Amino acid sequence: MPILMSSTTSKIVLTATRDYCLTMNSRTTTGVLTFHRRFTCSATGTPRLVPNPPDLIKWVRREGGFVHPSVRIAESGPCGLGLVASEEIPKGSELIALPEHIPLRFPVTESDNGDESYSNLINLARHVPEELWAMRLGLKLLQERAKTGSFWWPYISNLPETYTTPIFFSGDDIKNLQYAPLLYQVNKRCRFLLDFEKEVRREVEDVKLQNHPFGGQDVDASSLGWAMSAVSSRAFRLHGKALQNGNHGNVPMMLPLIDMCNHSFNPNAEIVQEQGSGNPTMLVVAGMNIKERSHMTLNYGCLNNDLFLLDYGFVVPSNPYDCIELKYDGGLFDAASMAAGVSNPNFSSPAPWQQQILSKLNLDGEQALLKVTLGGSEVVEGRLLAALRVLLTNEAEIVQKHDLNTLKSLSIEAPLGLSNESAVLRTLIALCVIALNHFPTKIMEDETLLKKDVSTSMELALQFRIQKKSVIIDVMRDLAKRLKLLSPNESLAS
């Protein structure tokens, strides 16, 4: 029975061809990828690893895969190469089918069958944290890229030579993102690549050539960053073979040709994984009629722009799932409440009964998760909304009449009374103003800069911060409407 799976692949924006390695600015602790090369790359101006890579469609067909006769590889505007319909394709048509041996996976078994290069690759992967799973599959990708006569060379040679993920931004363009949560993640990845380069060198220093996981080639932060970006921007998590614990799980894998589909929240295709008595097959099926010259699209997931830029190298305009992160901080929330004209807020000194509710919301205690969000489908994260409602009332008995799910829902109007809800909404609007003022530039300034001749990374940084500011403004407008409807006598001036 076919199992519908969500795609996490990407078609990235291509930059001018160049090579990078990672350096660290000790004064700013900002990781920057600068010019250097270790792995052999193509000539300048070629968007893929080699100037004239093998025909990917022919290779897939030769290896037993299926490609619809109307599917073509073509330029996709700013997104580089993509898949295009040469004529109309009816809904339900199979577009691509890959047999099990074509996807590129990281080994999931501990058995090396006497192959020490395999064993050494497994050992390297143990140094990669789970959250950076793309690096594990990236190690396998680098191994196959270095291997003469690799089965996957026709696929690998078609991969982009460079990526527009922020680890390749200049130090200034990283700062130009203007958004602390993303800056933290970028610097974290850069530091990991620097440290992991040293770990790789230590692990393979005394390894014999025949046992070297990368065929004796030097692997530095440049090539590690390329591999991690290639995987994070193109890999799928699909049903895989059973692991030692008997759990099949979602196995990251790279699906040649399929990963050239672009992203859309309203895609015209979907990825399906067939499970049956024979070998499983990865399919892409037309979810609607695909018109001639239309690009084939998949939904990579309901992600915010942080993840789209960090993992995929692009920004989605008017992303309905975009949001901003705030730290739940008593002093900040007290200041926002007082700025909104709310008297005697309790955020810095909650009563014992309020503190108990904060613990249930995981906003208090040693294991508390203090990151809260505004925007996206919720508009206000439920935990934040419940905390504001509880801390802006002194009526413990009224609060105890409601469960947490009620207090966390913005669709339930004024569960603790109109006065409380008004204070909550005004505090949230004040928080938005504070968040907006943390950006050093205004949207109009960013839009003016965007019209100038700027680098690809600067353009992405500008697009990203414009969208973040737009999220805040949209949240403010939504909350202001709710406040106005709450009571005809409610004064927005306060």
Image: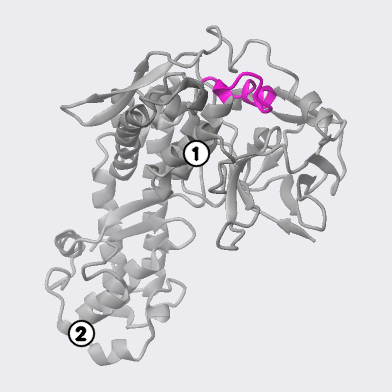
Which labelled disc corresponds to residue 411?
none
The structure residue drawn at horizontal position 24% and vertical position 44%, both measured from the top left corner, is 437
Task: State the image quarter where residue 208 is shown.
Answer: top left
Q: Please give left or right for residue 87 compared with residue 255 in the image.
A: right
- Residue 205 spot, x, y in % from top left: 36, 25
Q: Please give left or right for residue 444 compared with residue 357 in the image.
A: right
- Residue 465 spot, x, y in % from top left: 37, 37
Span shown in magenta: 145-161
The residue indicated by pointer 1 is 119
Q: How is the image coloured?
A: one colour
Q: Please give left or right for residue 421 compared with residue 410 in the image.
A: left
Q: Is residue 356 above or below residue 8?
A: below
- Residue 485 spot, x, y in % from top left: 41, 70
Queried whether the magenta region covers residue 479, the answer comes back as no
Which labelled disc corresponds to residue 353?
2
Task: State the image quarter where residue 374 is shown.
Answer: bottom left
